[in-house]
Amino acid sequence: MHKKKKSKKSSLSILSIAGVTSYKSKKNEKYMNSKQINHFKIILETWKQQLNTNKKDVYDISKKSSNFPDPIDRAVQEEEFNLELRNRDRENKLIKKINKTLKKIQSKKFGYCSSCGVEIGIKRLEARPTANLCIDCKTLEEIRDKQILG
């Protein structure tokens, strides 16, 4: 007996967050046609909405703070607060990237490498919808960064 293998979806996958499946390209389909653009708009807008929903006000975090008499407890609380602020900062930067990508969609520049102009590719964009470099240019950028930063 053959059992059908169920494909696992990561709960952290951008596609599962947006509630969409991987885009299935059709033969001779034009790159970045209206269906593909709509697919990525849904992903980006849902992702942005989820990030905005998860935001807590800094006031909410500081409201939870207590003045613990034990220095270790205070240090743990302070570290948790710092971690939350760093996460919030990352989320804010990601929201800015998403907004920038949505503007690229409007200007019909989405899906193409900002360095060489070649198609980035559906699979790469599904993995990282905010990507603005093709894999070759991104690899070169990373090599340059390693050489500069050592």
Image: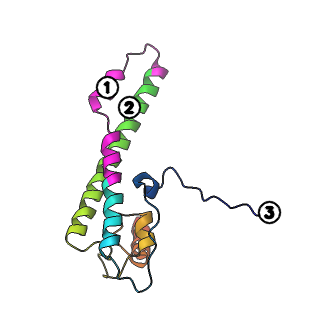
Is disc 2 placed on a helix, strand or loop? helix
- Label 2 to label 3: alpha-carbon separation: 54 Å
Q: Look at discs 2 and 3 and give the one toward the viewer.
A: 3
* 10 Å crowding of disc 3: few (<14), some (14-19), many (20+): few
Marks 1 & 3, CB-CB < 8 Å contact: no
Q: Look at discs 1 and 3 and give the one toward the viewer.
A: 3
Residue topped by disc 2: 81
Position of residue 146 measured from the top left corner of the image (x, y, whole percent):
44, 68
Give residue 37's mark.
none
Name the N-terminal-most of marks 1 and 3.
3
Position of residue 22 measured from the top left corner of the image (x, y, whole percent):
47, 66
* 10 Å crowding of disc 2: few (<14), some (14-19), many (20+): some
Q: Is residue 94 visible?
A: no
Is disc 1 placed on a helix, strand or loop? helix
- Label 1 to label 3: alpha-carbon separation: 58 Å
User: Is residue 146 positioned above or below 96 on the image?
Assistant: below
